[in-house]
């Protein structure tokens, strides 16, 4: 009996020990992903956010806290990120700490909830040209304002404030946005129930968790990987033309250098970085890389084939592959033109100030002048024959053959017929044309 009681108690004890871990495990299984969005909004950022959001979905995260601190960036990149946020299953809570300006405001409006730090600000979202900083044209501006309104309406926010953030003609003096000025809301203004652009002002992520009943959740903080960091840097719209200019200038310098050295390595490295970053960012597909490789192969073949067709096709393939790799063909076309201008300028400077000749192109292009002074002649000009005498071994009518010290030479007479066996003197040499006239030797009479 005692043994049975002991076994029963042991069974209860084991069952209790097994059941204890289950409750904490279930609680710990509730995860919240903390993702930071800082610096500039560009295409490379999309790759990092997509990877982070996918990880959150696969882990069954309860929510994603997107901590935002940015002065904005490029509207096309912001549009892709906004679409990504709409397609993500877990709730996305934007924590503005401390700025969500321009494209950052657009991204924040795609969040399910918005919280702001005490010094947080959201707004000033007028679209501008990335290259000049000037306002975009009327069509692009109208589209961007509509995008801001749609982003606000998609999460039941008053669209008039989103419109005022992007449209300077809207007058909101009570929020320091008179006519001609863009609306920027402070944390307290955004939390005002009449505005409704913030669920509250908080000082930390932990406060957001408490306000949403997630204080016991496990926080998973994502980090930008090394490759994503490269992609963010390389795909930056300012870095792209610089990289392409380095590649173009490196190739030009390589043309003036013997062998393959630092300039060629610099050019190849810049192009590899360009394609690597755009592949990681999801902007370029492998088809663009294949097209680029085909272009390079055609350019190399030009050194072995005549006609120039392979070189032209190769250059076109390279340019097209670069334009397609950027995601925005118009901007990439500008970048390519900048790179070409830099390369041409470099070539002019080298030729004008350093007097260098193209080393590599000497193998496929005749660079020297083919004149007599440079040592080029179409035929041997035998000026040493002038004044020498010979014997006609054939009649000269007026052309024929003479014998001069055992050498047979084709000649023409100076106009008159000269019979075979007559003595002649060479009076003119013009390349292959040797002119003779008859001479009388002593003892001969006509």
Image (tube, rainbow, N blue to C red):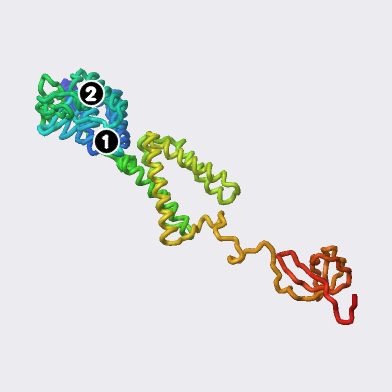
The answer to whether residue 63 is visible is: no
Question: For this rendering, which residue is in front, 428 or 324?
Answer: 428
Residue at position x 23%, y 33% from top?
35
Label 2: state its secondary structure.
strand
Q: Answer with left or right where residue 257 lies relative to residue 8.
A: right
Q: Earlier in the sequence, mark 1 or mark 2?
A: 2
State the residue lying farthest toward the front: 446
Label 1: state its secondary structure.
loop
The answer to whether residue 169 is visible is: yes
Image coordinates of residue 333 in percent, x first then y, are: 40, 38
> Mark number for residue 91?
2
Question: For this rendering, which residue is in front, 253 or 344?
Answer: 344
> Mark number for residue 134?
1
| Figure check: 201 above or below 343 | above
Image coordinates of residue 291 in percent, x first then y, are: 48, 39
In what quadrant of the picture does the C terminus appear? bottom right
Question: For this rendering, which residue is in front, 33 or 410?
Answer: 410
Image coordinates of residue 268 in percent, x first then y, are: 42, 49
Q: CA distance from mark 1 to mark 2?
A: 36 Å
In what quadrant of the picture does the N terminus appear? top left
């Amino acid at each position: 009996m005692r043994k049975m009681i002991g076994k029963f108690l042991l069974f209860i004890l084991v069952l209790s020990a097994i059941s204890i871990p289950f409750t904490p495990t279930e609680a710990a299984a509730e995860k919240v992903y903390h993702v930071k969005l800082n610096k500039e909004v560009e295409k490379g950022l999309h790759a990092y956010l997509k990877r982070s959001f996918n990880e959150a979905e696969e882990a069954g995260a309860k929510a994603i806290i997107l901590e935002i601190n940015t002065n904005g960036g490029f509207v096309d990149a912001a549009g892709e990120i906004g679409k990504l946020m709409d397609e993500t299953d877990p709730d996305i809570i934007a924590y503005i700490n401390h700025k969500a300006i321009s494209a950052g405001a657009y991204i924040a409006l795609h969040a399910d909830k918005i919280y702001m730090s005490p010094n947080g600000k959201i707004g000033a979202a007028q679209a501008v040209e990335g290259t000049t900083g000037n306002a975009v044209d009327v069509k692009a501006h109208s589209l961007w304002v509509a995008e801001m309104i749609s982003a606000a309406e998609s999460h039941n926010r008053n669209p008039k404030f989103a419109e005022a953030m992007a449209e300077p003609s809207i007058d909101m003096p009570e929020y320091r946005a008179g006519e001609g000025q863009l609306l920027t809301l402070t944390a307290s203004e955004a939390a005002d129930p009449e505005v409704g652009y913030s669920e509250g002002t908080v000082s930390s992520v932990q406060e957001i968790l408490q306000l949403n009943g997630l204080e016991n959740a496990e926080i998973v903080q994502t980090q930008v990987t090394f490759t994503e960091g490269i992609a963010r840097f390389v795909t930056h719209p300012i870095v792209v033309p610089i990289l392409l200019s380095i590649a173009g200038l490196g190739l030009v310098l390589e043309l003036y250098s013997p062998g393959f050295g630092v300039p060629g390595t610099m050019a190849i490295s810049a192009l590899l970085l360009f394609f690597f970053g755009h592949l990681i960012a999801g902007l370029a597909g492998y088809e663009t890389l294949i097209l680029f490789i085909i272009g390079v192969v055609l350019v190399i073949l030009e050194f072995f084939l005549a006609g120039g067709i392979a070189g032209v096709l190769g250059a076109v393939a390279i340019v097209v592959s670069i334009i397609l790799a950027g995601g925005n063909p118009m901007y990439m076309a500008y970048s390519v033109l900048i790179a070409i201008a830099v390369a041409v300028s470099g070539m002019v400077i080298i030729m004008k100030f350093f007097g260098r000749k193209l080393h590599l192109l000497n193998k496929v292009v005749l660079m020297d002048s083919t004149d007599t002074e440079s040592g080029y002649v179409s035929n041997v000009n035998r000026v040493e024959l002038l004044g020498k005498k010979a014997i006609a071994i054939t009649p000269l009518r007026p052309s024929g053959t003479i014998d001069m010290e055992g050498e047979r030479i084709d000649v023409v007479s100076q106009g008159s017929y000269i019979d075979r066996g007559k003595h002649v003197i060479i009076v003119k040499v013009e390349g292959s044309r040797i002119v003779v006239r008859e001479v009388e030797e002593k003892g001969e009479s006509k």
